[in-house]
Amino acid sequence: MIEFIFDRAIQRYRYADSGKFVGAKAIENLTIKAIVQVEGDITTITNLLIEGKITVETWEDGTRSALKNLHTWNYLLGAGGEKQMSQSDYGSLGQKIKQEYKYLRGLAQELVEGKVTEAQLRARMAQYAASGGTTHELGRAKSHQKAGYFWEKRIRTKLNSCESCYRYAEMLWQPIASLPEAGQKCECRSNCGCYKVFSRNLTKPGDSILEQGFGWLGKLHTRKYGIRQTDTVRFIRSISVRSIDSAKE
Ligand SMILES: [Zn+2]
């Protein structure tokens, strides 16, 4: 099995054997793969509900556990794997999952009351799955805070970001943990395509850093950016218990 190591200082994964970096696009791919997989799972469950084969209760339980997986995997991916998880990380992740459960509870209630059309239900499911992207960002943000980064900046990736997201992006570099996380305090919510970049400069960085936009859905990079043959869960399991901090070596 290929093993991966998380380098805390630069917040990147490396191949354990060669020490080479795993490309950022490859990690992005794993995030999207998790979203696509869970979107498939909850679509299957939702189809059963629409066909009248399962009850709303069974549907809610199945959807809950699929969403729990999604958010856990994507947080772990952003945070450097299970061994990097602190109590505070589990707190942030738990809070996020709880919030998603609350949305789901509300939807289940509306279903029981017959207030939701099939199209609305399917749209909501797609939205729930997409929110896995914001959880990956949450894991990344917390991890950079722990690693002693000082600055952060929000990057937009969507042509139709909400007003709030435009405003956050225009604020450029700000002290770490001062800008809202992707999907929070904005009207795009789970569809928010924003992400953060981080800096450990002592003084406020300039804005010459090369920025590359990407959105969470609709672009699974093939071949070039694949980590050989792996999926998200396999990757998370193969992150080494060892981790390094290249700044201290
Ligand atoms: Zn927004």
Image (spheres, rainbow, N blue to C red):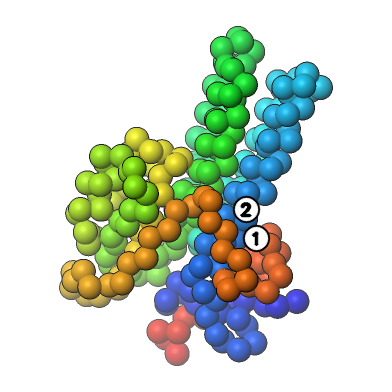
Secondary structure under tag 1 reads helix
State the residue in front, 151 or 211: 211
Q: Quadrant of residue 206?
A: bottom left
State the residue in front, 38 or 149: 38
Please name the amino acid that badge 1 sits on: Thr
Instruction: Say which quadrant the N terminus sits in.
Output: bottom right
Instruction: Say which quadrant the C terminus sits in.
Output: bottom left
Q: Position of residue 144 (x, y in %)?
A: 39, 65
The answer as to whether callout 2 falls within 8 Å of ligand 1 is no
State the residue in front, 32 or 16: 32
Q: Position of residue 139 (x, y in %)?
A: 48, 56
Tell which circle, 2 or 1, labels the residue nearer the N-terminal end. Answer: 2
Give the residue number, with chain letter if any, for mark 2. Answer: 34
Checking the image for residue 135, the label placed there is none
Q: Is residue 69 visible?
A: no
Please name the amino acid that badge 2 sits on: Ala
Tell me the distance, in whole angstroms, between the alpha carbons under discs 2 and 1.
6 Å
Q: Residue at x 62, y 83 (%)?
A: 16
Q: Quadrant of residue 192?
A: top left
Give the residue number, with chain letter if any, for mark 1. Answer: 232
